[in-house]
């Protein structure tokens, strides 16, 4: 029996990579899924098409998670299409790597606006649309918040902030029966991983060598954890930051 039958889920940044895999997994578990995108409409619509071909329900909606007006429109459309919200996955994120000398105000604001302000604003608006039974908020963080690799000062700081957001909101929203957890992946073979030049690189080889399970992650690995956190099987989990890294530390 599907674990999320009758549930409604929003996945931000769901047009590709981890977000797309999470959207497909939630739909396969029975949820109606809203896939948001900032620019990749084609990718988001392709994910929705795949959901439909597998017998699920889904729609694609454009929404910049750093802009409140677009977030409000997102949830209005979601509610009109499927009813009250049950699951929110704050997956939309951006990154760029470089030394301290390369840090700029513009790049700082770009990453923090999407990676920190975005989940805050999206979750804030989602509160108005969760059903009476509460639900689950799942933030997608990164092992970078703990590993703090060189040349990631802005990105690592933004993901550390997201860890704090997760823990604070878990306490703040518990009275509404809304659970808040974070999945913090290690290296995952996504389109972004490939376009950044990491696939089959020395970086990937070193990551594999340091990973007890002997490989880098696949989007489906993270999607399986998200599906669990979205379900009632995880009803006793909130405020947790789960490292999904194959044992990499």
Image (tube, helix red, strand yellow):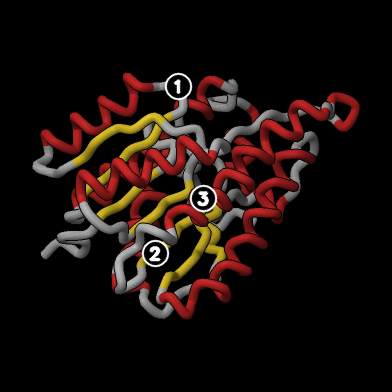
Tag on residue 39? 1
Spot occupied by residue 125 in the image (x, y as percentages of width and height): 47, 53
Mark 1 burial class by Cα count in 10 Å: few <14, some 14-19, many 20+:
few
Quadrant the C terminus occupies: bottom right
- How far is the residue under mark 3 from the one under mark 2? 13 Å
Left/right of residue 194 with respect to residue 228 in the rendered view? right
Tag on residue 140? 3
Q: Quadrant of residue 11?
A: top left
Q: Quadrant of residue 2?
A: bottom left
Q: Nearer the viewer, mark 1 or mark 3?
A: 1
At horizontal 67% and vertical 35% (from top left) the residue drawn is: 111
In the structure shown, which secondary structural element does the residue marked by tag 3 occupy? Answer: strand
- How far is the residue under mark 1 from the one under mark 2? 26 Å
At horizontal 87% and vertical 32% (from top left) the residue drawn is: 100
Q: Nearer the viewer, mark 3 or mark 2?
A: 2
Disc 2 designates what residue? 136
Spot occupied by residue 79 in the image (x, y as percentages of width and height): 27, 49
Spot occupied by residue 203 in the image (x, y as percentages of width and height): 64, 32
Compared with 216, 49 (above or below) is above
Quadrant the N terminus occupies: bottom left
Q: Residue furthest right?
A: 101
At horizontal 13% and vertical 36% (from top left) the residue drawn is: 52
Left/right of residue 55 with respect to residue 103 in the rendered view? left
Compared with 233, 153 (above or below) is above
In this orientation, does residue 246 appear? Answer: no
Q: Earlier in the sequence, mark 1 or mark 2?
A: 1
């Amino acid at each position: 029996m599907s674990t999320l039958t009758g549930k409604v889920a929003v996945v931000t940044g769901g047009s590709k990579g981890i977000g797309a895999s999470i959207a497909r997994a939630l739909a396969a578990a029975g949820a109606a899924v809203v896939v948001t995108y900032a620019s990749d409409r084609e990718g988001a619509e392709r994910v929705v098409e795949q959901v439909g071909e597998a017998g699920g329900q889904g729609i694609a909606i454009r929404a910049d998670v750093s802009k409140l007006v677009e977030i409000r429109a997102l949830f209005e459309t979601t509610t009109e299409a499927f009813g009250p919200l049950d699951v929110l996955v704050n997956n939309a994120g951006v990154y760029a790597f470089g030394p301290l000398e390369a840090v700029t105000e513009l790049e700082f604001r770009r990453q923090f606006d999407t990676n920190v302000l975005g989940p805050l604003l999206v979750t804030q608006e989602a509160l108005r649309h969760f059903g009476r039974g509460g639900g689950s908020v799942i933030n997608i963080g990164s092992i970078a918040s703990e590993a703090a690799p060189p040349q990631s000062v802005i990105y690592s700081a933004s993901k550390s902030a997201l860890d704090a957001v997760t823990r604070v909101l878990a306490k703040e929203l518990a009275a509404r029966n809304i659970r808040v957890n974070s999945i913090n992946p290690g290296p995952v073979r996504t389109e972004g991983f490939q376009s950044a030049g990491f696939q089959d690189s020395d970086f990937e080889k070193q990551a594999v060598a340091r990973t007890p399970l002997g490989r880098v992650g696949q989007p489906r690995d993270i999607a399986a954890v998200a599906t669990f956190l979205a379900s009632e099987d995880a009803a006793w989990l909130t405020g947790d930051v789960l490292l999904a890294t194959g044992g990499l530390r």
